[in-house]
Image (cartoon, helix red, strand yellow):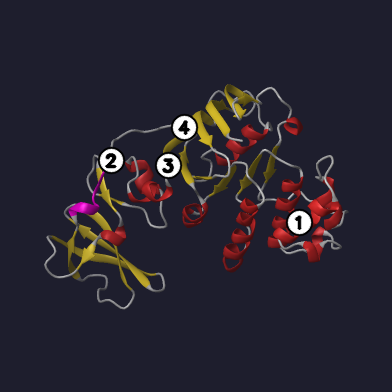
Amino acid sequence: MSLEIVDLVAAYGTARAPVLNGITLTVPPATVLAVVGPSGAGKTTLLRAIAGLLRIRSGDVRLSGVSIRALAPQQRRVAVVFQEDALFAHMSVESNLRFGLRPGASSKDVNGVAQALHVEHLRKRRPRQLSGGERQRVSTARALLSDPAALLLDEPLAHLDPSLRRSIRDEIMGVRQRFAGPIVYVTHEHEEALSIADTLAVVIDGRIQDAGEPQRVYDAPRNAVVAKFFGARPMNVLDASGTCGIRPERVVVGPGGSLHGRIVRRERTGADAYLTVETRRGTIAARVPADSAGAPGDEVELELPERFIVQFDGAQAMTLS
């Protein structure tokens, strides 16, 4: 069952300016679409509009080609897991799981989902006795037990310690083994988006600025807006008109480089370090090994390999369909 969002325009209340402006997306069955963007870009608003929790001004939401725009949220078969879990505090985990159980489901279904998300040993506990990661796993399990046609995850790991994110993410994404529908996964973590997505959409100011295969979006962003935003470190944009760029890890630092500059900052990140270098082509970031030479004030030579320079098309918004 595919999920389609067609030219979606949405706003809160009577506000004139829409939060979402012409969003078009298609998420095939058994596919994870990661939606990434800055705070206030409209990511959560998009999920709320799909789920029917926000009235849309125009456009459509479809499941397998059938419009669900006029349906109430409980009729849409769209499950949402928000970053703030919505578990019932007075109920046990077992009762929370069964609360979302679809008609005709059995204890075997509950057991299977609980085991898949590693919450079977928590079934007698109350939510207050769970860690943040455990609550998110229970919330996801309950969503799956409602038999949704589409699953929406809104920054489910945002409040977890970094040390827990990878393991909890792997467990949550393990639902793909039990769920054949489309998944929309909203996150502000760029590396997380790259690691979990089959397709990726970058939303900025309520519009899709780029979308497609995740590595392509990273390696060759469609415009300078995405290049300056997407990635743990933004792409270097090489001229004032914003027509081309290169990733910091593609910049070569060493003797013989054709571009001269002066290091103004060095940041350690563990195995690597990032140099910020002032050059005649502007400020350029370069990734180097952590044990390499180079300190603020040093003169360096850079090479920008032509094969890694990306030309932007200048477009400011697009659709994915």
SS under mark 2: loop
The three-letter amino acid code for the residue at tag 3 is: Gly
Type of amino acid under label 4: Ser
The reply to whether discs 3 and 2 touch (Cβ–Cβ < 8 Å) is no
Q: CA distance from mark 1 to mark 4?
A: 34 Å
**98 or 106, which lies in front?**
106
Q: Is residue 238 above or below residue 61?
A: below
The residues colored magenta run 306-311
In the image, residue 290 lies at what x, y percent? 34, 75
Q: Residue at x 50, y 30 (%)?
A: 23
**Numbered disc 3: secondary structure:** strand
Label 4 secondary element: loop
Q: Residue at x 76, y 47 (%)?
A: 145
Instruction: Give the number of the mark in front: 4 or 2.
Output: 4
Q: Amino acid at mark 2?
A: Phe
Q: Nearer the viewer, mark 2 or mark 1?
A: 1
Label 1: which residue? 112
Q: Which residue is mark 4?
A: 321
